[in-house]
Amino acid sequence: MIFDLIILAGYGESDALLCENEGVTKKPFLKLGDKTFIEHLVENLRSLKELRDIYLSGMAEKEWKTDLPVIFTEDEGDIISKLRRHRVTYYSDKEEPDYVIVVSGDTPLVTAASVERFIERCKATTGGELTGLYYMSLIDQKDMVAKFPESNRTYAKFKDVTFASGDTLLAKPSIIDSHGDVLDRMVNNRKSVFRSLAVVSPIFAIKTVLGLATLSDLNNAINKKIFKTPNACIGVIVEDVELGMDVDKLLQLEVVRDYYQKNIANKK
């Protein structure tokens, strides 16, 4: 099996205050110890099993200050449009990977081991093999609060679990052809559970708000109403909360830096 890794390393308008406060041009250049977020991610993830290439989406080669092996994609826009352009640009003249792993550039604590455990969880949900089109990482509130009690995440409350959206996903490139537009709307609304679910079904969104839906109901509703096939798009609860510990605010930057100093830097 072939995996390609895409690290989202661009800039959004909502990043302005944090970047200005830290004196950087984009969030992946925020410092964690003596290295930037993006340097940590590339170093941590280059050992992923069956990994072929690492792409930095939204970053120019002139911005890269190390000799770590990456491919630069100076694209803009939302996640799905990035994937669409990426597929046309890079897979028209070489073998398409079985799956692309997408990781946000503002989640510097993500490691190869945590992504590999996510992939194993994905396999477990579809009979032991990767047969789905799109897997989303989800973080149980209890796990997030236990590890990062001051992280200030936004959660979706379901009947059987309360979770936050992770910032790592696994996608089969061909999904862009068949369901790119609706995925675009779902991903862009991921910070608001109600708006994201309303893309699937307004009635289901209301059912969820009332606490009547389970995570299994969510997966089934997405696949029935959008993909018209079982196990196409699946939300997977992961054990590694680092996959959802992104940095959007100064408070979260302080949380990540404190954790890194106490649990990683001091053990090197």
Image (cartoon, rainbow, N blue to C red):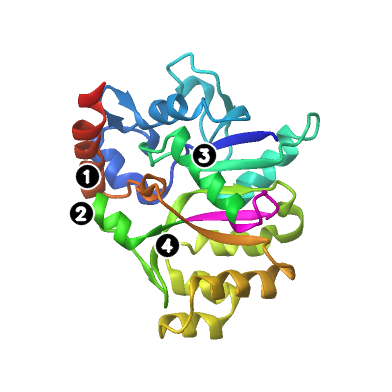
Query: Crowding near pointer 4: few (<14 within 10 Å), some, many (20+)?
Result: some
On residue 191, the disc is 4
Which mark is nearer the camera, 4 or 3?
3
Q: Quadrant of residue 200?
A: bottom right
Q: Is residue 52 magenta?
A: no
Pick the quarter of the image with the C terminus: top left
Alpha-carbon neighbours of circle 3 within 10 Å: few (<14), some, or many (≥20)?
some
The magenta segment is: 125-137
- Tell me if residue 129 is in the magenta stretch: yes
- Which of disc 2 and disc 1 is earlier in sequence? 2
Q: In the rendered structure, which disc, 2 or 3, sits on the residue that comes first in sequence?
A: 3
Locate residue 107, reporting x and y percent: 38, 41
Which residue was labeled with disc 2? Answer: 150
Q: In which quadrant of the rendered view does residue 209 lie?
A: bottom left
**In the foreground, 43 or 144:** 144
- Which residue matches tag 3? 116
Which of marks 4 and 1 precedes in the sequence? 4
Amino acid of disc 2: Glu
Q: Mark 1 sits on what residue?
A: 255
Q: Quadrant of the N terminus?
A: top right
Q: Based on the displayed image, in which of its 4 quarters is residue 102 positioned? A: top right
Mark-to-mark CA distance, 3 and 1: 24 Å
